[in-house]
Amino acid sequence: MTSTVRKGKFSSLKKGVKPTASATQAATSTTFFKGAQGFPAVIQPTSKDLDPYVWAETNRDFIESNLLKYAGLVFRGFGLKTPQEFEQFANAIQPGLYGNYGDLPKKEGGKKTYKSTPYPENKMILYHNESSHLEQWPRKQWFFCELPSPVGGTTPIVDCRRMLSVLPSELVQKIEEKGLLYLRNFHKSVDVSWQHFYKTDSKTEVEARLNAANIEYQWLENDGLQTKTKTHGVIVHPVTKERSFFNQVQLHHIACLEPEVKESLIELVGEQRLPRHVYFGDGSAISDEEMAIIGAAYETCAVRFEWQQGDVVMLDNMLAAHARDPFEGPRKIVVAMGDIYTQQDLKQANQAQ
């Protein structure tokens, strides 16, 4: 563990001299939000002279070990004011941020940062692990508060290791043994088209990508596309070897839609043509009652805190889920991702145990 500051209290830490562990502890403090039960850890500088970029680069081991231990970190008071400064900070922690994420709009002025999910302000974005239903996903994810909303707009976060002890053991076992089956139907008139989602007009290219990812698919009438992806609902973390509730059931299950929207969609296209839905891996239904149990468990485990301008939240996406509360007024949260894992990476890591 090392630490570097600009001047002042730790000016003896000159260039070329490796700081000690005690200097790291002196340069930052680690605390927790009241009642948060050890998640997330809140890291704050103890000197106004601390250089956030040099500190982040020279403390990668310190950050990584704490991320693996706590699943989530909040960097507060590091003096970051712009999305560009945030991107520099995140890149100092994890060089080579992921810049080809198609599900979020790019942040103007940034190279590898994104705006948060565009979604009605008066509705909650439910809990999920980023891209956990896809062939690849980021292990690390950052959220930067450029501008907190005056009302609401918190980003609830959940330690997904704890979810497994809160959920009924029989439901966890069912998800773990059967896995999950995600259904997507791409309709131009109902949801996004496959051309927009895959960023191509070539069916051949889409088929090649789906075959490579072992995703079942069929072309539908009116230039539609249906995909079925069988994958995990619970994983073993590749580094910590801890079990984690890792999925997007709330974002896909129709029970999580408002009743009138659910009824209208089923009436319009039928269950098998819904834009998105999720089943157990054998194709059997996840009941509305089971979804209610999962939703209640997320809320039991959720940690909410008020954003402060300049805050950075860093999550291990394979250990922690996030959501977004409704809000009023302006709100600007910037997102970055890195340390990409694939299904094959996870499989190899688990085989190496």
Image: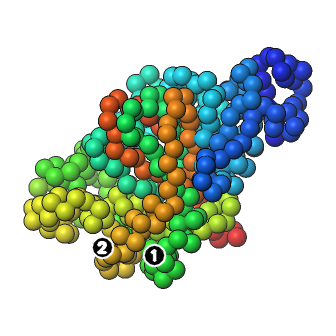
Disc number at residue 175? 1
Label 1 vs label 2, nearer the camera: 2
Q: Measured from the top left, where is residue 289 in percent x and y?
A: 33, 75
Q: Measured from the top left, where is residue 265 in percent x and y?
A: 15, 61
Observer-nearest of 104 and 165 = 165
State the image quarter where residue 63 is shown.
Answer: top right
Q: Quadrant of the C terminus?
A: bottom right
Q: Residue at x 26, y 64 (%)?
A: 254
Q: Quadrant of the N terminus?
A: top right
Disc number at residue 288? 2
Residue 205 seen in the figure:
no
Could you tell me the amino acid type at mark 2?
Answer: Asp
Q: Secondary structure at mark 2?
A: helix
Q: Is residue 167 left or right of residue 184?
A: right
State the image quarter where residue 20 is shown.
Answer: top right
Observer-nearest of 2 and 70 = 70
Observer-nearest of 63 and 33 = 33
Q: Measured from the top left, where is residue 339 in percent x and y?
A: 59, 46
Q: Residue at x 49, y 56 (%)?
A: 302
* Above/below status of 162 relative to 39: below
Q: Is residue 151 left or right of residue 45?
A: left
Number of dots carrying numbers: 2
Residue 176 seen in the figure:
yes
Q: CA distance from mark 1 to mark 2?
A: 15 Å
Could you tell me the amino acid type at mark 1?
Answer: Ile
Q: Secondary structure at mark 1?
A: helix
**Upstream in sequence: badge 1 or badge 2:** 1
Q: Residue furthest front?
A: 34
Disc number at residue 34? none
State the image quarter where residue 348 is shown.
Answer: bottom right
Q: Residue furthest bottom?
A: 170
